[in-house]
Image (tube, rainbow, N blue to C red):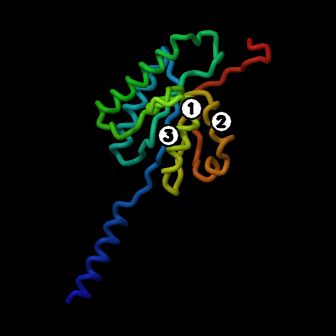
């Protein structure tokens, strides 16, 4: 009986979806790597791999940006080189762990199409990722300063409000006086 077969397949399909339909936290990692935190970034990726394998979370992207200008006295011209090197190290670690599907996006980099356009900011990368965020939203894990998120939220307040589940800050804060000290 074709009608009975259709009903049977429909029930089986629905029950199958219900059995394998559990919430998976989706997040975007914002990092500003420096010479002294490379090991922390790579260990975090190894931990993410374990949580990904358990089906607990998935990463929609890692945005790597240089530290803000004047962030501290230790920031130097070498930080841009360090940022590029660590972005490559993050990509290599993701590939090694079977997570090559996670895009590593470099903020402050020239556009790949060779145009004379402004450099691509972390806020630009966030906008592109937020365009494909599922309705349940996304969490932002920040191991850097909040300046990139502040820029994104200022440009796109409705998107930020509607699609951001939480902001998890894993870095410290630094007080900068008006005189820059």
| Crowding at mark 1 (Cα within 10 Å: few <14, some 14-19, many 20+) | many
Q: Residue furthest right?
A: 178
Residue at mark 1 to residue at mark 3: CA–CA distance = 15 Å
Nearest the eye: 66 or 40: 66
- 15 with respect to 80 (left or right): left
Q: Earlier in the sequence, mark 1 or mark 3?
A: 3
Question: Which residue carries the number 3 mark?
Answer: 28
Residue 61 location in percent, x, y?
45, 39
> Marks 1 and 2: in contact by CB < 8 Å?
yes
Report the residue at 58% width, 21% height from top.
67
Question: Which residue carries the number 1 mark?
Answer: 121
Please determine whether, in this image, residue 23 is positioned above or below residue 160. below
Q: Which mark is residue 103?
A: none
* Image depth: mark 2 or mark 3 in front: 2
Residue 112 location in percent, x, y?
44, 31
Quadrant in which residue 1 is drawn: bottom left
> Which image quadrant: the C terminus?
top right
Q: Earlier in the sequence, mark 2 or mark 1?
A: 1
Please determine whether, in this image, residue 24 is positioned above or below residue 43. below
């Amino acid at each position: 009986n074709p009608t009975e077969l259709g009903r049977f397949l429909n029930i089986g399909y629905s029950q199958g979806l219900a059995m394998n339909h559990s919430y998976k936290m989706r997040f975007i990692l914002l990092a500003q790597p420096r010479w002294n935190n490379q090991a922390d970034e790579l260990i975090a990726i190894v931990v993410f791999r374990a949580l990904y394998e358990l089906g607990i979370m998935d990463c929609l992207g890692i945005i790597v940006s240089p530290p803000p200008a004047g962030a501290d006295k230790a920031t130097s011209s070498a930080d841009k080189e360090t940022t590029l090197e660590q972005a490559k190290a993050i990509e290599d670690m993701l590939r090694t762990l079977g997570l090559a599907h996670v895009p590593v996006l470099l903020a402050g980099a020239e556009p790949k199409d060779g145009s004379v356009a402004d450099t691509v900011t972390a806020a630009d990368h966030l906008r592109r990722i937020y365009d494909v965020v599922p309705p349940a939203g996304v969490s932002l894990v920040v191991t850097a300063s909040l300046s990139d998120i502040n820029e994104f939220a200022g440009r796109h307040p409705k998107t930020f409000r509607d699609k951001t589940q939480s902001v998890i800050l894993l870095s410290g804060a630094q007080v900068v006086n008006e005189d820059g000290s």
